[in-house]
Image (tube, rainbow, N blue to C red):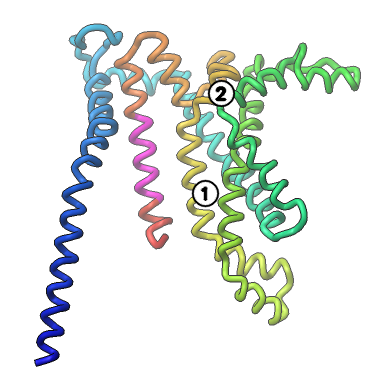
Amino acid sequence: MGGSALDNHESSARHLSGDGRFATVILFLPPALLLFTLFVVLPIAEAGWYSAFSWNGFGRPTNWVGFDNYRFVFESRAFGLAFRNNILIILVSLLVQLPLALTLALMLADKFRGAVALRMLFFMPYVLAEIATGLIFSFVYDGDYGLLASIYRMFGAEAPHLLASPQTSMLAILIVIVWKYFGFHMMLFIAALQGMDRNLVEAARIDGASRSQVLRYVVIPLLYPTIRLSIFFAVIGSLQLFDLVMPLTRGGPADSSNTMVSFLYNFGITRMRVGFGSAVGVILFVICVTFAFTYKRWFMRDD
């Protein structure tokens, strides 16, 4: 008798709990779906629709061109340069920025005098707005009056105009990218290191493992989830890079420093080719979504 009453009580509790979850879903899901539809789904659908027209953004689009805008995009030399630059940014982010961030995180994760100050010093560039960063470095790179020119004059040499040369403009932007964003990844790694089970590290040291062996076989494997997340952020951020490029070079000279987003702005928005720009936006969206789902499926499925 007592067992039956207890079972009925548990069944009623589960029923009430299920009703509570259902009520929560009914209460919060429609506003979220409405906002997602208004600000994500509809703009994407509109971009796809406009990409099928040769349209300047005024009035109703009527000049249907089908997939011609996509053909024009892929035939454009400037888009090829922009795509190449995005790939270059991804490679520099993965091969330079993330190893630098991980190295500094390993050095600064432990508590010692001045550690917090050093962390904040390295993290400050990330807090600085992208436009402000671009304006600051446009002065730093100025070959006549900037900081770089002053350094060269100290050695009696003439400073190069890095941002004015197609051969060096992208290199200058890559330096700014590494400087600005490595602090974000460093803080991710520091948070992961501080949340790590230190007993595993101590056990490895007691068993006679050297510092490099502890790092290779204990610390780095425990950091794999954070490293995978950091790679995801780095790639998506590299594909969407825009704010740093515009104040530095605006994609020039001769389209040598365009990214796909700055290409969209320069060749779609400023030239009033909204249909062409929408095609670029759809291509970029497909690339980002394909990478996100593929990366999640193959590398982050257990995270």
Alpha-carbon distance for marks 2 and 1? 23 Å
Q: Position of residue 2 (x, y in %)?
A: 13, 91
The one nearer the camera, 302 or 68, is 302
Q: Quadrant of residue 21?
A: bottom left
Contact between marks 2 and 1 (CB within 8 A): the answer is no
The image quadrant where one finds the N terminus is bottom left
Residue picked out by circle 1: 230
The rendered magenta stretch, by its main secondary structure, is classed as helix
Q: What residue range appears in magenta?
A: 283-295
Circle 1: residue type:
Ser
Residue appearing at x 29%, y 10% in the figure: 57
Residue 286: which disc?
Answer: none
Is residue 149 shown in magenta?
A: no
Circle 2: residue type:
Ile
Residue picked out by circle 2: 131
Residue appearing at x 49%, y 53% in the figure: 228
